[in-house]
Image: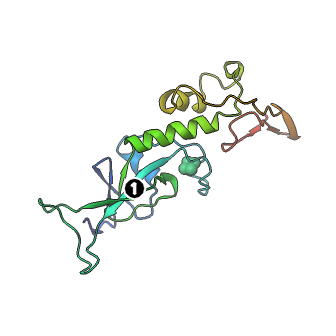
Amino acid sequence: MSEPKKDNLISVFVDGQEVRVEPGTNMVEAATRVGTEVPHYCYHPKLSVVGNCRMCLVEMGLPGRDRATGQPLLDGDGNPVIQWMPKPAIACATTATPGLHIRTQSPMVKECREGVMEFLLVNHPLDCPICDQAGECRLQEFATDYGRGFSRFIEQKNVKPKRTRIGPRVMLDERTLYPVFPLHTVL
Ligand code: FES
């Protein structure tokens, strides 16, 4: 297992690739440093983590320890045995600890993203190409990149108002993706 070194950085692993980060760095940021996108909506580096959208689900594992002795578990080659959690975790709220591993491309993660996208789009209007944001919209991009391409939802969509002025410079758009930021500043 990797230990803190003099530079105070610790090693975590993104899809098996080591990256050294400051303790407490969240795994969305750690993945970004090795060029891996963990899709996310509600996380923003300058805001506190809310963990609403679930788009950043990943598999998470830690080096195992022998329960009797407390010693690290090693495989036949002397490498740490990683014990993977049975459930996915949100990367935005998972902070780096020494030896932490995440998987961002596994079948479980793919299925999670497809389910989340399907859920987020349940009440989304089908005429989204007319939206001002069309073409530069992360909802469209993630639906293409991570969605399953179809929805099992056949019930009537709950259609909310598109524009409600709630202040001199703020518009509430209740048709946009709920867990993201439905407030737009009117410039
Ligand atoms: S980015 Fe929304 S839950 Fe992690």
| 134 vs 47, nearest the viewer | 134
In the image, residue 99 above or below residue 138: below
In the image, residue 165 above or below residue 101: above
Q: Quadrant of the C terminus?
A: top right
Q: Which residue is mark 1?
A: 60
Residue 123 image point, x, y percent: 71, 33
Q: How many marks?
A: 1
Residue 133 image point, x, y percent: 66, 26
Residue occupying the point 58% across, 42% down: 41
Judge: label 1 CB < 8 Å from ligand 1.
no
Residue 170 image point, x, y percent: 81, 40
Residue 143 image point, x, y percent: 55, 30
Residue occupying the point 68% across, 23% down: 128
For disc 1, the neighbor class at 10 Å (few under 14, some 14 to 19, many from 20) is: many
Q: Would residue 48 be visible to someone looking at this image?
A: yes
| 66 vs 161, nearest the viewer | 66
**Quarter residue 68 falls in:** bottom left
Q: Would residue 44 be visible to someone looking at this image?
A: no
In the image, residue 78 above or below residue 132: below
Residue occupying the point 61% across, 57% down: 48
| 148 vs 53, nearest the viewer | 148
Residue occupying the point 40% across, 47% down: 31
**Quarter residue 164 falls in:** top right
In the image, residue 58 above or below residue 116: below
The colour scheme is rainbow
In-image side of 42 versus 161 (left or right): left
In-image side of 159 versus 40 (left or right): right
**Quarter residue 183 falls in:** top right
